[in-house]
Amino acid sequence: MWQITKPQIFLLACGAFTLRAIISLQSYSGFNKPPMYGDFEAQRHWQEVTINLPIADWYTNTSDNDLMYWGLDYPPLTAYHSFINGWVAQKLNASYVELHTSRGITTEEHHNFMRNTVLVADFLLYIPALIIAVKSIGLQWHPILSLLSLIVVLFYPGQIIIDNGHFQYNNISLGFAALAIAAIFRKSERLAAVLFVLALNYKQMELYHALPFFLYLLGHSFTSSKQKSTSFSQRCVAAVKNVAILGLIVLFSFALIWAPWLRSIHHLKQLLHRLFPVARGVFEDKVSNVWCVVNVFYKLKMHFTNEQMAIACLISTLIAILPSSIHLLLNPRKEAFLLSLINSALAFFLFSFQVHEKSILLVTLPVMLYFRMDPLCALWFLHIATFSMLPLLVLDQLIYPTVVLTSIYLMLIRVAIRWSVNDEKTTKLPLWDVLSLSSISDNKLFVGIFYMSTFVGCSLLVVGQVFVRPPNSLPFLFPLLISAYSCAHFVLFFIYFNIRQIFGGATVKIDNVQRVTRKTTSRVATNKKSN
């Protein structure tokens, strides 16, 4: 039987890295758009601030740190990373991070430096983390699914186009989160706690994943199989001890990272204020979540204050996340944990306060890792997630690279199926039939029609966004349609993934996958004999 090898994994990683380097040659957020210059300038400015100002002033408004001009609003680990990049930039060329005078710098040398900082994070953290996570989750799975899973995570166009195109460092927080998930599947709960603290302290949006991590570790402490042979009282004592150790690990990790701001209540409050800015409003731009769609028909910002909307968002999010959370606490299994990560992140994206288009990447990470358990729906979701960021990508002039990346993504998956299975009949089947190894394939005709119609709708909206001029009275017609179309899909996926978790459909049983792959292998052998 064909087996995926380490050299093949290495080649896939090299291909994924090369593709990221190519995308780095494209346009980026805020290119030649004064006075703010977009996310690219924000990341550069944070390097300027952290390398030139004392650490106590990084999050504080001063004469040298105007918080209205891209003030630092991510946790301390982002600030430390900015400091390291700023230190390297200063050594290479001090003009890159010269206080006040370097704003909006657009030299080719600086552009290359900034792009390379993202590629370094890809090389050192994100790509290795994804490979480790895929291998950790799929230790008992068929190599064909392992190959497809690696392609799905390494070449996902949404993350590539945001980090290496638009310009951000989501690869760092997502890389730590992927390693934390891998640690859970490898039964290294304490390491998982440390890794997730690192992810959360790089970007506060990792709160989307926080509740599943907490509930799984809590529930697992009380249901660990290692304690079943002991008495009830002994199990309780051992569980409480384990929870206490995990709590101390988390507190110590936080204290170590936040130490410079714990010395002053004023600086600590300022840091917290920067991380959770209520004044920005419920959403920005055209986001594919519930509040943005509702706002089309009922102007939320005109009828409610930011504080009122923040409370409404908090309550709505907690209600949405409650079924998945209760189920995970009572059933702390690894498969349920992975689905709970999806459901929690998607609930936050749909209902929480101050959501950005790029926040959908927090949902795509667990969905990618769930691919081998439900290939069709995972791939379906990933395409819609990339599509939902289209309004942002159009502003950055990245629509054509996104289309090319998506085409390469589909092509690689089809080639992998043909190469690994080597079955002419199988490769001629529609994509949804080849990939669907779960119970959803029982209704192939209905699912296939629904699946393909989704992409027809996406294609029409892409054409409209790029080539059709909207009426003057509706200048944002296509961004709103894209957001509403994507949001409708996300709501349906949210319902589906909750059903999968709560009603026993958390995984495709290994026996079923092996049965499918045995049939495939048998057909290959029969074809070879007949030839």
Image: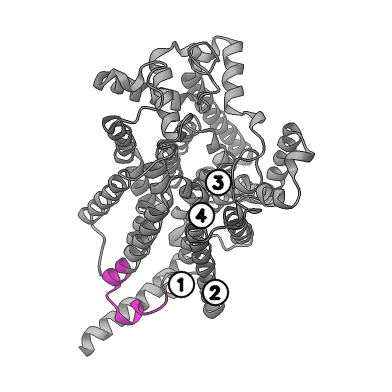
- Mark closest to the chain's N terminus, 1 or 2: 1
From the top left corner, tell me how far across and down residue 299 is, in percent: 74, 45
From the top left corner, tell me how far across and down residue 150 is, in percent: 34, 55
Magenta highlight range? 415-430
- Mark closest to the chain's N terminus, 3 or 1: 3
Question: Disc 4 and disc 2: Cα gap in Å?
Answer: 19 Å
Residue closest to the far right = 303
Circle 4 crowding by C-alpha within 10 Å: few under 14, some 14–19, many from 20: many
- Mark closest to the chain's N terminus, 4 or 2: 4
Circle 3 crowding by C-alpha within 10 Å: few under 14, some 14–19, many from 20: few
What residue is pinned by disc 2?
A: 447
Q: Which marked residue is nearer to the observer: mark 3 or mark 2? A: 2
Q: Secondary structure at mark 4?
A: helix
Question: Disc 1 and disc 2: Cα gap in Å?
Answer: 8 Å
Relative side of 340 to 279, left or right: left
Q: Amino acid at mark 3?
A: Lys
Q: Quadrant of residue 195?
A: top left
Q: Which mark is residue 432?
A: 1
Question: Disc 3 and disc 1: Cα gap in Å?
Answer: 43 Å
Question: Disc 4 and disc 1: Cα gap in Å?
Answer: 18 Å
Q: Amino acid at mark 4?
A: Ala
What residue is pinned by disc 4?
A: 385
Q: Amino acid at mark 2?
A: Val
Do callouts 3 and 1 mark residues in contact (Cβ within 8 Å)?
Answer: no
From the top left corner, tell me how far across and down residue 201 is, in percent: 49, 29
Q: Secondary structure at mark 3?
A: loop
Look at 46% across and 48% down and name the residue there: 393
Q: Which marked residue is nearer to the observer: mark 4 or mark 3? A: 4
Circle 2 crowding by C-alpha within 10 Å: few under 14, some 14–19, many from 20: some
What residue is pinned by disc 3?
A: 228
